[in-house]
Amino acid sequence: MQWQPLEAAVERATGRAFKVRDSRSMGGGCINQAVLVSDGKRSFFVKLNAASKLSMFEAEAAGLDDMRAADAIRVPEPVCTGSSDGNAWLVMEYIPMGGRSNARLAGEQLALMHRKQADAFGWRMDNTIGSTPQPNDWMNDWAAFWREQRLGFQLQLAARNGHKGALQSRGEKLLGSFDRLLDHDPVPSLLHGDLWGGNIGYDREGNPVIFDPAVYFGDREADLAMTELFGGFGTAFYETYDAVWPIDSGYAVRKTLYNLYHILNHLNLFGGGYAGQAQGMIDRLLAEIG
Ligand code: ADP
């Protein structure tokens, strides 16, 4: 990696000279390579991928900006994005993590972020969930948004990836049952969009930090559902969330409908075993409505 174009971009963005003296791999996340770069005084967290992924990083930076603007929970500040020598990069504020976790504060602050609202469901640009495209065309009808731009989109992708048969026929039935399954009228809340346990940390002072988002305005329950998908954030988290903004009745069933999106996405990203899990979720949802 030639650092010069990145150094110049950091310099332009911050108005201060920057030369990489030290670079340390922070390992790979699920999708990108992460590097900590420093000039001895200032450090930045850099995500790297192929140059073709520049728009993915631009949308990630915009998502970080929007979550920061809600001023509810700590979010790394994006510095600049760019590409050079076949690499795309996203440079952001480096936040040392590893502080004591505080689920109570995280629940409260997420509820406050969800208070930030738009007039419709969607976002100002498309982005990605993992590395899968995520469409965000504005719509007024939440059920139609979830049917078309979330589940329908992933099911079509699954068909193109060769996952046909029962998954598709049961999936079609599910999409046709939305008037009964998603009879819910949420407000369009600012969502992180990919809030599993790997995308929250705690800074040295113990403040929650959320990163690696797939931002859009949607039902806040979609964020809550994902916190429960791979293990849960602990009862204190849900207690304080509920104290700030009580969770609506019927969430337990909608949770499966919302998490189905992420399981279909995992099927499309990683294949194999997720097909059975997705189909099990679809069957459970169809059983709900008899
Ligand atoms: P990926 O998109 O590849 O999944 P992430 O954005 O999730 O990558 O980052 C990978 C890891 O790096 C995270 O689990 C987190 O611990 C750490 N991390 C992410 N952003 C920052 C940051 N701004 N400062 C310090 N550490 C970070």
Image (cartoon, rainbow, N blue to C red):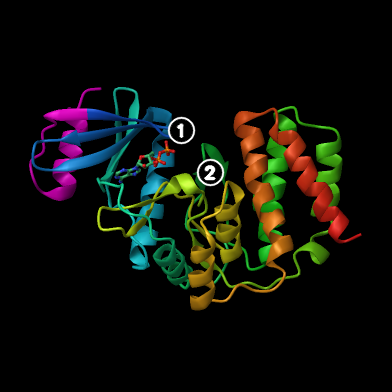
* Residue 23 horizontal/vertical position (percent): 20, 29
Label 1 neighbourhood size at 10 Å, few (<14), some (14-19), many (20+)?
Answer: few
Toward the viewer: 73 or 15?
Answer: 73
Q: Which residue corresponds to mark 1?
A: 31
Q: Is residue 180 above or below residue 127?
A: below
Q: Secondary structure at mark 1?
A: loop
Q: Name the outermost residue toward the right.
A: 290
Quadrant of the drawing holding the C terminus: bottom right
| Mark 1 vs ligand 1: CB below 8 Å | yes
Identified at 39% across, 36% down, the residue is 54
Identified at 66% across, 55% down, the residue is 258
Quadrant of the drawing holding the N terminus: top left
Q: Identify the mark nearer the N-term, 1 or 2.
A: 1
- Which segment is the magenta one? 1-23
Residue 150 numbered tag: none
* Residue 154 horizontal/vertical position (percent): 67, 42
Toward the viewer: 38 or 107?
Answer: 107
Toward the viewer: 200 or 30?
Answer: 200
Q: Number of marks in the image?
A: 2
Q: Secondary structure at mark 2?
A: strand
Residue 129 numbered tag: 2
